[in-house]
Structure formats: structure tokens, C-alpha cells
Amino acid sequence: MGGVLGKSESPRHSVPETKLEAKMVAAVRKRASQGCAMKSFNSIILKFPKIDESFTNCKTIFKQFDEDANGAIDHEELKRCFNKLEVSCTEEEFNDLFEACDINENMGIKFNEFIVLLCLVYLLKVPEPSHAKSRIGLPHIESTFETLVDAFVFLDKNKDGYVSKTEMIQAINETSSGERSSGRIAMKRFEEMDWDRNGTVTFKEFLFAFTSWVGIDDNEEEDEEEASDK
């Protein structure tokens, strides 16, 4: 297995491309210093059904703030959402989050983008003493976000805030039963995450891949077909 990637293929040292990415990296590193509950990549896969259920429950929240029911949350709708959830941020931070998650650049946050955005807010927001058990007013969903953060920390073996190909192979081979998965599976999963093909995966890229793995993209397509049929 160790021969799948040679030393010459080690990823370059990653440098955050935006302020938001720098904040994500810092937050992931801080979280990594607290340890990781995940023991294997298989343990992440076993949580897929529960995570999918939690994401499905999040659909109700999405529809609540998609006030014009067009399948996307615009700037003003998201601001009202943040106010409702008591999420405070500067105008620059708000715009950075919106732009980072609006991957289609259509000025609207679709459901899978909404999940990623909320998870980023969860990662970046420091809990206040008065809200010790909740960061964004959604305790049940926040437990799922914590699982996703923990999963990324498990993959990030060198704790630099990014996941490399080598780390992905290592993580997939660390199963609780001692079995070794193929490098091909590791590469396929990594390629699904590394959208910009720069050899490293950010937490945001990981989240978008994860929503696809648990079937959120498929659910969205079904909802769009139902809406067009009405």
C-alpha cells in the first residue's frame, strides 16, 4: 500500500487562499488539538444513515428561510436566517461565507450549500457562555456538524488543516478490524473531494463531498423535478 504514492508525490505546503480559508484552517487545527473520537474511515461510513437523517431534518429549516420557495436562499433571506439563529458576523464575514458556499455563483444558496454553510458557521463560531450547549441554536443538528468536524480531523493526520492524498490512503487503511482497503478506493474518494485538483482538500471541499456521499445532491434533484411538475 505504501507504494501507491511515492515521496515525490507529496503535496506542496498549502497556503490559505482567502481569509475564510485561513479561519477554517485555524479552527480545524484548534479542534485537532482536542483529540479525535473517530477510529477508522469505516466508523465514518457507519454514521452515514444518521447524518443523512439529520440533513433531512435540516430541510425544514431551509424551507423556512427560503421565503419565496424558489429552492435557494438569497442574501436577505440568509441575513434573516442568521438573525433568527443568533449568528453574529461582520458584513465581510457574511459575504465571504455566502460567496464560498454559492458554488454555482447564482446568488442563491441551495440546500446542500446551506448545510455546508451552517457547518462552517458551527466550526468558526466560538460558543458563548449563555449558549454553552449550542453554537447556532440547532443542538440536534450541531451534533452532526461535530461528527463531520471530527471526521475531517481524523483524516488530517499531520494536523495542518488540510487533507492530502497520502493522508487519505492512510486513513482508509486504518480500519478497526485491521483489514486494508484498496488504494483505488482512497484515490476515488480523494478525487471526489479535491475539486480544484491542487492535491489538498479543505474542510469546505470535504463537506461538499460528504453531502454528495450521503445522497443530498440526489435528493435535491428529486425536489427540483417535483417542483417543475407542479
Image (cartoon, helix red, strand yellow):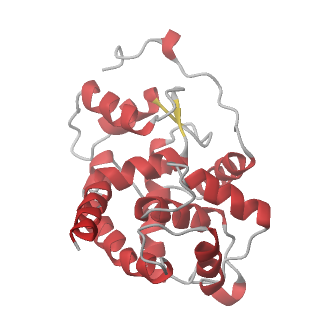
Q: Position of residue 164 (x, y in %)?
A: 49, 31
Res 4 quadrant in image:
top left
Asked whether residue 135 is in view, the answer is no
Relative to 215, say whether 91 is above or below. Answer: below
Count of labels shown? 0
Between 186 and 157, the one lying in front of the other is 186
Query: Where 11 sits versus 32, above or below?
Result: above
Q: In the image shown, does 208 or 169 lie closer to the viewer?
A: 208
**Residue 102 visible, this angle:** yes
Relative vertical location of residue 32 with respect to residue 178 in this rendering, above or below:
below
The residue lying at 33 percent from left, 47 percent from top is 40
Who's the residue at 78% across and 60% down the image? 92
The residue under the point 70% across, 60% down is: 95
| Relative image position of residue 216 (x, y in whole percent) | 31, 59
Residue 167 horizontal side relative to residue 134, left or right:
left
Observer-nearest of 175 and 222? 222
Q: Is residue 51 left or right of residue 64?
A: left
Q: Residue furthest bottom?
A: 130
Q: Quadrant of the N terminus?
A: top left
